[in-house]
Image (cartoon, rainbow, N blue to C red):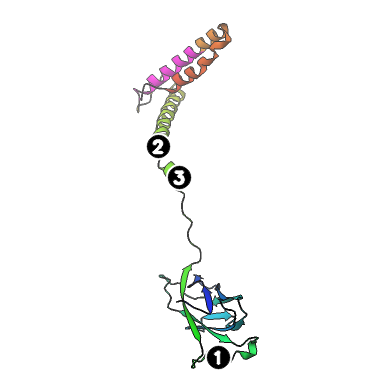
């Protein structure tokens, strides 16, 4: 609604709704004229709200803040729907008017007297909205590449653990029933790989220093198993 005397901001009162806690919001009243303007604030539910500066007089081109406080609610509402409203009345006062000039007749409609009204509805908002979950963290957790890598490492580790248990229990000859065809192969590859590493290490001691880059290849051949 357009007004020639006062500008009311915002157009609706948004109050955080929280059980057993008082919450407040503010509205701004701005005098748009070069005259003294009297104002009065009313509500449809006066027992539920307390208003600071329910009435007053604004000097020409001045402004003031009105604080609306809602009493602590006892119960939680699911839809946060509110039917409460506020009404701001304004009228032209005489030049140099004070609070003593704020009489009820000033806001009574009469011929030649301009009285403007501005209505505001109350809107409840969540007091503590939930924080959004970062999408990057979800994408990293759901990456299929990490699952494949972890599964491969788990299989290799479990196979070597089984070979070690078999050697500890029955000496050099493995006697495990479960996975008997796989364990000897792994043990044989492990022993042969160690022998090859010792031979290459002896050769590297004789070769020039430039052949030291063969170490990553040894690690790569030891970590790769033909069993899988």
Q: Are marks 3 and 1 in contact (CB under 8 Å)?
A: no
Q: Is residue 5 in view? A: yes
Name the residue: 53% across, 89% down. Answer: 107
Count residues near mark 3 (Cα–Cα under 10 Å), then give few for <14, some for 14-19, many for 20+.
Answer: few
Are there few (<14), some (14-19), or many (20+) residues within 10 Å of tag 2? few
Residues at marks 1 and 2, CA–CA distance in whole angstroms = 77 Å
Q: Is residue 57 left or right of residue 42?
A: right
Disc nearest the viewer among 1 and 2: 1
Would you say residue 190 sits in the magenta stretch? Answer: yes
Residue 193 image offset from top left, x and y in percent: 45, 16
**Residue at 55% across, 93% down:** 105
Residue 207 figure quarter = top right
Q: Residue at x 56, y 85 (%)?
A: 92
User: CA gap, disc 2 to disc 3?
Assistant: 17 Å
Does 4 lie within the magenta span?
Answer: no
Give the residue pinned by disc 2: 147
Image coordinates of residue 137 in percent, x first then y, are 46, 45
Find disc 3 in the rendering and name its residue: 136
Residue interval drawn in magenta = 179-197
Q: Does dot 1 land on a helix, a strand or a loop?
A: helix
Residue 172 against residue 117 in the figure, above or below: above
Counting residues from the start of the chain, the first of labels 3 and 1 encountered is: 1
Q: Quadrant of the C terminus?
A: top left
Q: Is residue 122 depicted above or below 194 in this figure? A: below
| Sequence-wise first label, 1 or 2 | 1
Q: Which residue is mark 1?
A: 106
Q: Which mark is residue 183?
A: none
Instruction: Give the Cα distance between marks 3 and 1.
Output: 62 Å
Residue 28, percent across and down? 56, 73
- Graded by Cα atoms within 10 Å as few (under 14), some (14 to 19) or many (20 or more), the crowding at tag 1 reads some
- Please, what secondary structure does the residue beneath circle 2 have? helix
């Amino acid at each position: 609604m357009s007004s020639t005397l006062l500008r009311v901001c915002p157009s609706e009162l948004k109050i955080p709704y929280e059980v057993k806690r008082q919450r407040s919001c503010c509205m701004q009243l701005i005098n748009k004229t070069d005259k003294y303007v009297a104002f009065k604030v009313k509500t449809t539910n006066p027992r539920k709200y307390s208003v600071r500066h329910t009435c007053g007089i604004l000097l020409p081109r001045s402004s003031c803040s009105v604080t609306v406080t809602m009493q602590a609610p006892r119960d939680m509402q699911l839809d946060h729907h509110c039917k409460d409203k506020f009404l701001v009345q304004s009228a032209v006062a005489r030049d140099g008017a004070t609070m003593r000039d704020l009489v009820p007749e000033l806001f009574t409609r009469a011929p030649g007297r301009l009285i403007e009204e501005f209505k505001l509805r109350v809107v409840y908002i969540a007091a503590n909205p939930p924080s959004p979950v970062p999408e990057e963290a979800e994408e990293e957790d759901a990456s299929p590449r990490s699952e494949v890598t972890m599964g491969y490492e788990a299989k290799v580790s479990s196979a070597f653990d089984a070979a070690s248990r078999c050697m500890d229990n029955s000496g050099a000859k493995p006697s495990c029933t479960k996975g008997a065809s796989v364990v000897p192969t792994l043990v044989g590859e492990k022993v042969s790989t160690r022998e090859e590493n010792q031979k290459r290490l002896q050769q590297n001691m004789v070769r020039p220093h430039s052949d030291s880059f063969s170490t990553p290849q040894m690690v790569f051949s030891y970590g790769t198993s033909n069993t899988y």
